Every structure is written in structure tokens, then in C-alpha cells.
Amino acid sequence: MRRKHATEAVDIDSGPERGLRMYLHGFGQHGVDIGRLTLAEVGRSGAGVAVHRSAITTDMIMLPSSMPAKGTRLFGDALVAHAIAHLRYSTPGRSVGTRVPMMVAMMSLIEDMRVERLMMREYPGLHGLWGAFYRTDGDPSEKGLTFPAFAERLSLALHDPGYRDPHHWVEKGRSLIDAIGDDLLEVRRFDEVASILASDLGQMRVRFDPQSYEVKPAYRDDNTFLWRFDEADPVQAIVQAKGEQAQGVAESQSDMGNGESEGEASNSPEAVILMYPEWNYKTEVMREDWVGVVEGRPVKTAATSPEDAPRRKSHAPVRVRYRQTFSTHRIRRQAEGDELDLDALVNHVVTQRSGGAPDGNVFSRLGRRPRPASVLLLLDLSASTSRTIEGTEMTLLDCERAAAEETIEAFDGEASRIALHGFASNGRAEVRYLRLKDFGVVFDEEHRLRVRELQPAWSTRIGAALRHAGSLLGREANPSKTIILVTDGQPSDIDVFDERYLAEDARNAVDMLAAKGIRSQCICVEPSAHDVICGIFGRRNCLSIERSTRLSDVLPDVLAKAVA
């Protein structure tokens, strides 16, 4: 989707550019020049190809290298008017981040529509000008079920109220936009619509080729004005792997020479995307490679000083009380004990009858040793954790931080290995998963800073987070493996409207983990969600508390029972 543009200077007194410059100034858009794209470097070969779409910068509108032979003036007017709409109403250079190319294209299409509607409020005649460039090469509904065809049909439906498309996806897009009404400045709501529509296309298995896709109608620009791409190409930056392949992907990250401790995630906030299945309870079908888990670390912000940490009471006794959990077991082949060791006794008799000299160690006795266990603490980092706890100045996320830090300091050691991870979701394509502290790594000041820098955002797609947590926990050699989720409500996400869907998927994830010997437990700080959470984890594995400030008391108890 990204091109390297080459421009050439334009003689202001030659060709259509002179008229377009006057047209541009007629809108009062001064300080913006007209240029022309020549060739674009595509691929590693750097070969030059014609560019059929315009491009915009903050101070230049670059015409495509080839213009239509007929209607050049009207085409140029439509192109410049659309560019002005972006310059006036769009936010340039939004970070692409971990958005997949189809999502970027859909958000760009919706943004094109939004700014054009804002422009038509001031200049109603633009509706007819832009409308002349739809259906120039036939009925878009007859072009198949490809992404370019769907995008063209949706653009037409959003521009022409009289157009009716036979496909439900196009009409759904129109309905979602109509529901927003005239509130055209709420960019977030339009982004949500784009996310829903892109998700639907993914469910329909519609494929997207960013290298061949061209925006339609042709007067619209290539949308590079809207986005800021990272150094890596968006397509190449996404590494897709099934959940069972997560181990190999993570191990390859540790070999990149970044100087980090073994098991730690890469420094990039968007390290890798792993694809996981999701359970559809209505059809009783496991949708393979359905959810993208973006694994990384919190985006680094300004350093947080110790004084900025939330004020909370000290829980020093926790460290003493739960310093180590022991399990009892029988020590075999002892000279003295309270029971006979039958295996040792049989060997004793065999050795004696064969003429040997048995050692006489035929007893067993009770002994104690630290019970090896691995526990993964999984924190809900969704937007709802930003709410302030009644009667305090702390948020729910502050309580999660405090409880997690104190519990790790009390338990983490050679026998009980503790990891601290967190998650939030922005649709099925972007379940952000943060590895704040991994197994076998000392919880030091750097880890504390990561925890304190956490910011709540987005939603709670629990099933995907549990599957990824289980994939990481499954590598542990300890026989006892437990995931403890701390959340404030039932599963939800912006692209799911059936309240039962994500709860059923989470329950399926819990069952699948149990089949692998991994126990899943949950502490819920929202009593109203107790029944839903119990339906996911089972009543023996969930605990609801009314006051979030009790987390620092409850979490150590739950973890102690998990490793006991």
C-alpha cells in the first residue's frame, strides 16, 4: 500500500495544472502547491511504473502520472476538491501500528466518505461533481466478490442514497454510517464502523492484495496522507503463526541479539502477530486462525518516578506469610520410617535370595519439599479498569498493579515461578498481549516501571488471551500450571454484539487448557458479572469481590492455594 513518490515541478502556466491551481485557490486553500507524480519505485528492483492515483502532503497535491484522456478538467476538479477535504478535515500521519492492510484500506475508505460529506456541507455542488466518476467502467455489483469490488460498491452506496446493493455487507455498511447521522466529527465512531466491516470481510474469507489495490473512484488519492508507516512494510511486519507455533516464533525473537533476558519479549510494542482459533457456539465450529494476538510490551512513555506510583497501604506481611509453599511426599528407601517401602522390600528379598548383601533400606517416611509450580497472572487492561474506586483516589488498574507487584515479590522463586502478563482487545484482528514479566526473570525496577506505565484501553477478548497465555505457560516444565485472570467483567469486544459469543469462546478456551493440564482461575471485581464468569471458569475456580482494594489481600490467597 505504500509507494515512494517522485514528483516533478510544474509550470504554472502550462497544461491543466494552471487551471487547477486557480481552482485550488478559489477554495481559499493557500500555501498548497500542485505537482505531478512521475514514477513510483515498486519492489526491491526499484522499477518505475505509472502511478494512477494522486497523493497529498501538507503543502502539495500531486497529480497522477497519467490523467484520463477525456474529461481531464472535471477529473482534476474532483481530485483537487477531494484533496482539499483531506487537508481541511483529516488528521495526517496516523500510526498504522499493528493494523492489518485490509483494516487500513477500510478505514481509509470510510475517512474518504467522511471528509467528502463535510466538504459537501459547505459546497453542495460537489456531490454531482464526484458522482460523475462512479460506475465509469460498469456496474460494480457485477465485478465479483473481491475486496476492490466490495470497496467500490460500498463507496457508491455511501455516496448515492438511491443506490441499492444486493449484498447484505454493503447495506450493513450503509446502515452503520446512517446510524452515526450528522455527527461527522466523531472520527472514533467511523473507525469502529471500519473495524466492523473489515472484520466481516475477514469472516467472509475475502482476500486483500495491498500491492494491486487501487482506490476507487479514480479521483481519490492513494491515502498515504492519512498514515505513518513504520520502517518495515505493513505486510512484511506481520508474522502469522498458529497458536501451536507460538513457541518457535518467541524463541526466534530471543535469538535476535537484543541483549534481553531469556523469555522476554522484543522491545518493539508490536513484536509479532499470532493467529489463534475462536469457538462459534451457534454453529459449533472452531474458526481456525480467526483472532490475531499482538504480542509486545507497553509503549514506553515518559519515565515514571516512584512518587508517581499510586498510594496504597503496605502489605509486607504477605511476603513473610507466603514465603514458600511446601508439599508433603514420601521419601523412599530409608533405613527408618513409619511405613514399609514395598518396592524396596521386594528388591531387598531378591538381593538376599540371590546371595547378595541388601542395604536394609526398606522403609519410607513423610518429608516436605517446596512444590514446583508455574503461575501466570493475567491482568485485564481494558478501558473499564480506568474507573476510580469509590472512596479512594485509586483506579481499578492501580489495584491490579499493587496486588500483582506484592504477590510476585512474595512468591516468585525457584519453586514457584511467576509470570505477569496483561491484555486488551480492539476487535479480533488486534488483541494486544503484553509480557510484563516472564518466568525465570527477576522482578526488578525495570519491570516495576513497565507495570506503572500501563494505560487502560479497548475491550476484553478473554478467550484469545487465555489461549496465548496457555501457549506460553505450556512450555514450563513444572507439573503444576495455573493461569489466574484478574478482570472486572465478562468478555466483550467492539466487533461482537452477541453477549454470549465471547463467553462461550472463553469457556471453550478454559476446557482446552484443562485438557492440556493447565488450570484456569479468575478473580472478578465486578459482582454483577459473577454468574457469567462462573459459567466460564466453573464455580470452584472463580472468586468475586465487591471492593477492588481487597485485591492485594485476595490474590496471594488464591495463588497460595494454586501452588499448594
Image (tube, grey):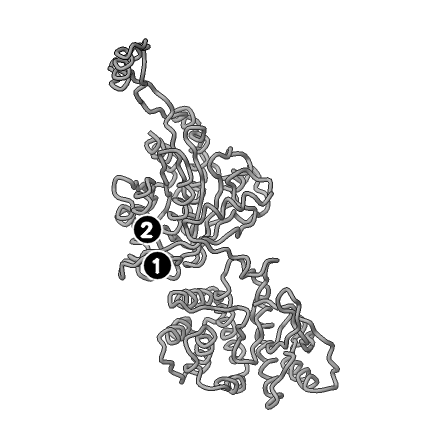
Q: Which residue is at 25% across, 11% downward? A: 353
Q: Which mark is residue 287?
A: 1
Q: Which residue is at 39% across, 71% downward? A: 176
| Residues at marks 1 and 2, CA–CA distance in whole angstroms | 14 Å
Tag 2 secondary structure: helix
Query: Does residue 227 sit above or below 266 in this rendering?
Result: below
The amino acid pointed to by label 2 is Ala
The image position of residue 93, as x and y in percent, is 59, 64
Q: Quadrant of the C terminus?
A: top left
Query: Callout 1 environment at 10 Å: few (<14), some (14 to 19), or many (20+)?
Result: few
The image position of residue 496, as x and y in percent, is 35, 61
Q: Which mark is residue 506?
A: 2
Q: Which residue is at 32% across, 32% downward? A: 561
Residue 286 lies in quadrant: bottom left
The image position of residue 150, as x and y in percent, is 43, 75
Query: Does residue 436 sit above or below 86 in this rendering?
Result: above
Q: Quadrant of the N terminus?
A: bottom right
Tag 1 secondary structure: strand
Query: Does residue 196 sit above or below 336 in this rendering?
Result: below
The image position of residue 440, as x and y in percent, is 48, 34
Q: Kindly indicate whether the residue at mark 2 contacts the one at mark 1 (C-beta within 8 angstroms).
A: no
